[in-house]
Image (cartoon, rainbow, N blue to C red):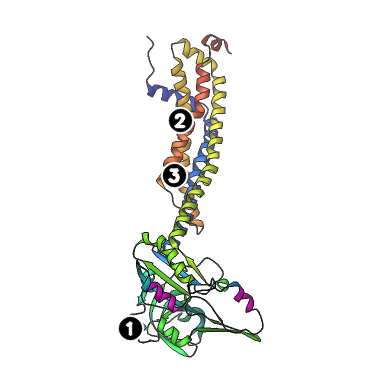
Amino acid sequence: MRKKFPIWRVVDLGIKSLLLHKMRSMLTMLGIIFGVCSVIAMLAIGEGASHEAQESIKKLGSSNVILRSLKPPEDNKASGSGRSFATEYGLTYGDASRIQHTMEGIEQVVPMRIMRESVRFGQSAAPAQVIGTHPIYSEISNLEIVSGRFLSPTDEQHFNNVCVLSLSLAQKLFPYENPLSEEVRVGADYYKVVGLIREQSTADKRPQSGAMEGQPLDNAMFIPLSTARARFGDTLIRRSAGSFEAEKVQLHQITIKFKDVSQVEEGVPQIENLLSKFHKKKDFEMVVPLQLLRQAEQTKRMFNIVLGSIAAISLLVGGIGIMNIMLATVTERTREIGIRRALGARKNDIISQFLIESTVLSVGGGLIGVALGIVIPIVVSYLTDLTTIITPTALILAFTISGGIGVIFGLYPASRAAALDPIVALRRD
């Protein structure tokens, strides 16, 4: 009865055979190294990009629905003449009230009015979005209060001339002073600064000049909605050389917060039906962060599949390289195979030896590739503004595939080596 070689002996023999040709073994591993590295790095970059997109959507609130006033196309055309009458469109205070009192499952309805004005302090001036809203806006929009406070119900009730500035606007107006308790001027009115907030834009990344009314941006100044209505009225007038444009818009945005996320999808068509009864023209748009979040998740899955498929091609090329080298090795070691068979080695022993050699190549390349795949995203994040996220799933998947490639692509060369006739192999020079 033939004695079976212990597995550790076969592994030791396989590693020694590879070390006899160090350069060839290293070059063979390069395909696997680059393949594993590219899989991990590309998935990390894709995961980071997806994470940023989803986080920006989550800031809008998964249980929120955002309504924005939208100027109808025919009004855009009408306003192109030299002199134009006031056009009336958009959301109204009545819309906010009807949604609040007629729909079930609504927790908060927060209206918002936005004016583009120049804000001044002393000799400093800066263009800003003056936003009139309710005190609850800070909670549903996840504003970070840096110092002071946000608007209060008392401010809203008594039409107080108080304001809260975003950090970007405060830094422009108060490069050296503490803004709190100072007064800024908008037009002929003065507003006392009661707080500073850090707010990132919830609008699309578009140039500010092309931003649509009703989208809160950086350089923001928040005032009570009652104050905004009393000081600015409902008609906005823009003057230019030889012409002016007047628009009557009561509200630029209404944020609706549902009590539960499960009620959002059911509430969206109800809101649209309710508004359609009082708006003859399509002068509003609806943004549903929950739907955007699901679309982003779907895009992430497709993106990962595409990136993974592209990177998997590199692993496939690396596997073909391993098969090519192992076939050449079988040809070179024909006499060695014949001697081993003559001394009692079985076909399974020959197959095990060559499979272990190919697996060592792929696993070794996989380990180096995993190390590089972890380092490269870190370097990319350090050198650029891109966010990269390395997931354990990507590491395990890439390393497992590299090990599987060693077995799959080493199987044919190993079977071919085991199939050699010992007598013919011994005659080979």
Q: Is mark 2 on a helix, strand or loop?
A: helix
Nearest to the eye among marks 2 and 3: give it: 3
Q: How far apart are labels 2 and 3 at the CA level? A: 21 Å
Picture quarter containing residue 356? top left
**Residue at the spot x=47%, y=65% of the render?**
287
Furthest residue to the bottom? 188
Label 1: few (<14), some (14–19) or many (≥20) C-alpha neighbours in 10 Å: few
Q: Are marks 2 and 1 in contact (CB under 8 Å)?
A: no
**Are there few (<14), some (14-19), or many (20+) residues within 10 Å of tag 3?**
many
- The answer to whether mark 2 and mark 3 are in CB contact below 8 A is no
Q: Which of 98 and 247 is in front in this view?
A: 98
- Look at the picture and state if 46 lies above or below 286: above
Q: Where are the magenta residues, as a range?
A: 74-100
Disc 1 target residue: 154
N-terminal label among 2 and 3: 2
Percent across and percent down for residue 30 are 53, 37
Indicate the amino acid at tag 1. Answer: Thr
Query: Pointer 3: what residue?
Result: 394
Residue 360 is tagged as: 2
Measured from the top left, where is residue 375 in percent x and y? 46, 48
In this rendering, the answer to whether 5 lies above or below 288 is above
- Amino acid of disc 3: Ala
Query: Could you tell me which quadrant the N terminus lies in?
Result: top left
Q: Is residue 141 visible?
A: no
Q: Which residue is drawn at 39% across and 70% down?
A: 143
Magenta run includes residue 392: no
Nearest the eye: 243 or 419? 243
